[in-house]
Each structure stands twice: as C-alpha cells, then as structure tokens.
Image (cartoon, helix red, strand yellow):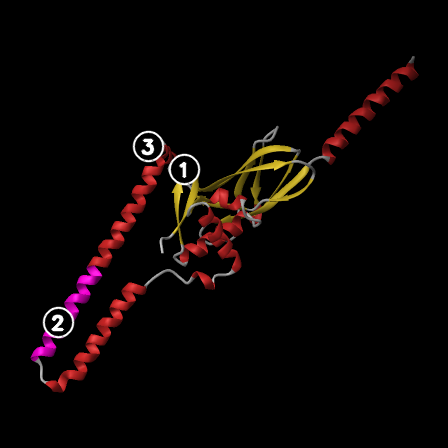
C-alpha cells in the first residue's frame, strides 16, 4: 500500500514537472530600447507594462527592457514620469505565435491632455470635412503670402522705373543693378519649393511612395506596418522628411497622421 502511494506521488510530480517545463519552453522574450521623442536618445527609468496574466511591469534601466510572454496577443504600454506626472507615453500591440526573441523598440511621444483628445475625436464636424478645411486654410495662407510678395515686387519695380525716369544717365548702371536684384527676388519667390525629391535616399523615397499610394495621407501606424523597419527607424525617417519640408505630421487621437506637402 505504501509503495502504491509513493508511485502515485511520483507520477503526479512528474506530470507537474512536464507541464511546467513545456510552459517555460513555449515562452518568448520581448525586448528592446525605449527612446525619447525629441532627441531619440535612450530614456532611462520608463515604466513598461503588459496586460499578461498575471500582468507584468518593469522599469527600463538604461533605456532597455525585457519581458517573458507566452504565445498570445498583448498590449504593451510605456510611460515616463516627471514630478509624478506622465510626460511621455506610447502604446503598442504585439502578437506572439511561438517562442523565440521579439525585438520591439518603443518611441515615447509627448503626453497630451486626455480630455482634449476626447473632444477632438467626438467633434461634430466629419473627419473628411475637417481635413479638407485644414487644407483650404493652408492654401489660403499661401495665397496671401504670394499676394503680399507680388505687391512688394511691383512696388520695387515701380520705384525703379520712377527713379530711372528722373535721374541723370550717370546713374543708369546703379538702376540696372537694382532692377536685376528685383527680378532675382521675384524668381526666388516663384521657384521656392521643398527639397528636390530625386536626391533623397532610397529609404526616404520609399516612405514618400507609400504615402502617395495612399492618396497623400496615411497614419504613422499604418506606414510602419508597410515597412520592414522598426518603429524608431520609421519615426526618424518621418522626422527627416518633415525637416526637409516634404511631409507634415499632426496629432489625431492617440496617433499621428502624415500628409504630403503640396508641391
């Protein structure tokens, strides 16, 4: 009888060991770096949380984090606090299908007032109309600037003509130089445009092609899903294009919308 009990205990312990070993072997490791939005430098002491069972929370020491998760779909959030206030925040989803290493870099964006975001999302103005209005406002501003520049050019030309008719011929060369400078100003106004696209690196050109294929407007999350680069790399490329004056980026809800600048 005692041997039979020992045998049952041995079988139970063996089954538990097999289950625990199988569970551990199917776990995956998710790791990466946490970056600051403005400088793209590693952000130390950010808090990383995941909605696993049970939930996990780690502190990104030296801007690096690591999590162990079994296969499934998860929401990973990263928050950075200053004076007990969240100043940077990001949410990312990940699907784990098998064990192994998963690299997910996190780029923390400035935290916005939640109430302001909710008011923007629940606006009575349709989204398409709101976006169209924004474009019209930008075009109106461009027209006003062009009109002001044109008036300035005509005033300068009128002044040059007036001086040329009332000054001795000895000052002819000076007047011609003034007229030449006026023409150069007008040419600069008419030909000023964003950086030549043909000189872009191939990865930046790829971003522009994807945005153009989507009608000139795309969310940053969708853009990242269509590219082979990490989130941090895509964000850096978008910022580069924005500095070159080729795209514009604005906040919409919890994400960003990227729009091609009208040529």
Q: Which of pointers 1 and 2 indicates the residue nearer the eye?
A: 2
Q: Residue 176 or 15: which is nearer the viewer? A: 176
> Which quadrant of the rendered structure holds the C terminus?
bottom left
Question: Which residue appears at 35% of the width and 61% of the height?
Answer: 193
| 8 up-or-down from 36: above or below | above
* Secondary structure under the numbered disc 1 in the rendered image: loop
Dot 3 corresponds to which residue?
123
* Secondary structure under the numbered disc 2 in the rendered image: helix
Q: Earlier in the sequence, mark 1 or mark 3?
A: 3
Label 1 crowd bin: few (<14), some (14–19), many (20+), radius 10 Å? some
Q: Residue 124 or 44: which is nearer the viewer? A: 124
Question: Which residue appears at 42% of the width and 41% of the height?
Answer: 111
| 112 up-or-down from 207: above or below | above
Find residue 126 and report its horizontal and vertical position in percent. Answer: 33, 34
Q: CA distance from mark 1 to mark 3?
A: 11 Å
Q: Examine the image and state in which quarter residue 241 appears.
A: bottom left
The secondary structure making up most of the magenta span is helix
Most extreme residue toward the left is: 166
Q: Earlier in the sequence, mark 2 or mark 3?
A: 3
Say which mark, if any, is on residue 158: none
Look at the numbered discs 1 and 2 and tell me whether their residues touch, using CB distance below 8 Å.
no
Look at the numbered discs 2 and 3 and tell me whether their residues touch, using CB distance below 8 Å.
no
| 193 up-or-down from 234: above or below | below
Q: Residue 30 or 193: which is nearer the viewer? A: 193
Dot 2 corresponds to which residue?
159
> Which quadrant of the rendered structure holds the N terminus?
top right
Question: Which residue appears at 32% of the width and 64% of the height?
Answer: 191
Write the start and end of the magenta stretch as one range.
Answer: 148-166
Say which mark, if any, is on residue 253: 1
Horizontal side of residue 17 vs 245, given as left or right: right
Q: CA distance from mark 1 to mark 2?
A: 52 Å
């Amino acid at each position: 009888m005692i041997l039979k009990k020992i045998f049952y205990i041995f079988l139970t312990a063996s089954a538990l060991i097999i289950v625990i070993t199988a569970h551990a072997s199917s776990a995956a490791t998710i790791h990466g770096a946490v970056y600051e939005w403005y400088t793209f430098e590693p952000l130390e002491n950010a808090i990383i949380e995941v909605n696993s069972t049970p939930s996990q929370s780690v502190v990104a020491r030296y801007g690096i984090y690591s999590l162990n998760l079994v296969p499934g779909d998860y929401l990973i959030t990263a928050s950075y606090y200053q004076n007990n206030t969240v100043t940077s925040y990001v949410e990312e989803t990940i699907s784990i299908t098998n064990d192994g290493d998963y690299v997910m870099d996190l780029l923390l964006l400035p935290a916005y007032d939640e109430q302001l975001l909710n008011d923007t999302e629940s606006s009575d103005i349709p989204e398409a109309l709101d976006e169209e209005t924004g474009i019209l406002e930008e075009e109106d501003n461009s027209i006003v600037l062009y009109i002001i520049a044109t008036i300035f050019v005509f005033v300068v030309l009128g002044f040059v003509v007036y001086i040329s008719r009332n000054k001795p011929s000895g000052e002819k060369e000076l007047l011609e130089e003034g007229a030449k400078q006026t023409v150069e100003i007008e040419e600069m106004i008419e030909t000023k445009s964003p950086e030549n696209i043909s000189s872009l690196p191939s990865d930046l050109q790829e971003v522009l092609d994807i945005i153009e294929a989507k009608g000139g407007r795309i969310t940053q999350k969708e853009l990242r899903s269509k590219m082979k680069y990490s989130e941090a790399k895509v964000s850096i490329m978008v910022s580069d294009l924005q500095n070159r004056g080729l795209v514009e980026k604005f906040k919409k809800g919890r994400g960003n919308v990227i729009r091609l600048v009208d040529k």
